[in-house]
Amino acid sequence: MQTLHIIKIGGNVMDNPQILEKFIEDFSAITSPKILVHGGGKLATELAEKLGIPQTMVEGRRITDAETLKITTMVYAGLINKQLVAQLQAKGIGALGLSGADNNLILSEKRNHSSINFGFVGDIKSINTSFLSSLLSQNIVPVICSITHDGNGVLLNTNADTIATELAIALSSIYKVHLSFCFEKKGVLKDITDEESYIPQIEKTVYQHLKSEKVISDGMLPKLENAFQAIEKGVSKVLIYHAKYLHTLENDFIGTELYG
């Protein structure tokens, strides 16, 4: 079974031109099939502030009202997506920028929460795996932003970590999937202030212990929940690491590898 790398790049990486340039170079050097997933970094928030549109975050997730949806769509599916595609093209990579609405790639439903109105936030229902595998077979690299749709003409803002996870799960029946969460830390840290305190390997039982002891920071918890869900549903490997260490994927890996 062929290996497929699905790599989600964090907002803080996209906001740092030097790290992003190194990431693009290393990502381009991966010879096996690959998919890049991204969110929006700080740009959507900054644009909303300039336009006087209030932004609300709950449990690390953006409340997406109608005006915020316009901004996130413009920034995620527009400027950032096409910048990443252009940078990959400059490295000789045949990249194709996509939202979940394109060719029904990612179908979602509007989140129904008992106490919080998340607005136009989408939870994933299905992935068009045949479309993705067709692109990959043609050596086309999908660059997927965090905008999906509901099948009825409505766009939805969907968490990029969740998109990467659901893509990995959906494609694990076709490929040996390696899922990577690339961000601005060296891995899962015992001490958020100490880069060298990263944990090289975490099993789920160890994760539950670290979680109960509050060793892992709250911001990392959703990422780890996504990671272990992926492992349980057939994803071969899940890694969390600093974007500048992408080149260590094949040898002498620097970061955190997760096990079921």
Image (cartoon, helix red, strand yellow):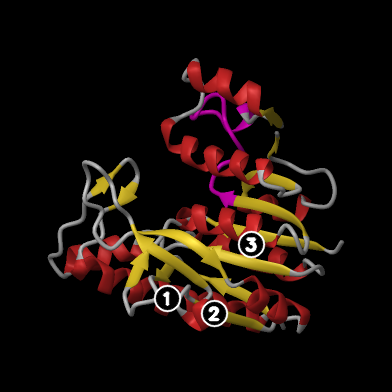
Q: Is residue 207 above or below residue 120?
A: above
Q: Could you tell me the amino acid type at mark 3?
A: Phe
Question: Which range is magenta?
Answer: 182-197
Residue ID at (52%, 59%): 163
Q: Earlier in the sequence, mark 1 or mark 3?
A: 3
SS of the residue at dot 1? Answer: helix
What mark, if any, has residue 145 been given in the picture? none
Left or right: where 195 falls relative to 109: right
Q: Quadrant of residue 252?
A: top right
Q: Could you tell me the amino acid type at mark 1?
A: Ala
Q: Is residue 123 above or below residue 189?
A: below
x and y, in percent, of residue 152 in the image: 34, 77
Residue ID at (66%, 60%): 6
Q: Quadrant of residue 9?
A: bottom right
x and y, in percent, of residue 44 in the image: 31, 65
Residue ID at (65%, 52%): 180
Q: Is residue 201 above or below residue 149?
A: above
Q: Earlier in the sequence, mark 1 or mark 2?
A: 1
* Direction top: furthest residue: 213
Q: Are marks 1 and 2 in contact (CB under 8 Å)?
A: yes
- The N terminus lies in quadrant: bottom right
Instruction: Give the residue at mark 2.
Output: 97
Q: Earlier in the sequence, mark 3 or mark 2?
A: 3
Instruction: Give the residue at mark 1.
Output: 77
Q: Could you tell me the amino acid type at mark 2?
A: Gly
Is residue 110 visible in this depiction of the protein? yes
Q: Nearer the viewer, residue 100 or 161?
A: 100
Left or right: where 118 falls relative to 83: left
Instruction: Give the residue at mark 3.
Output: 23
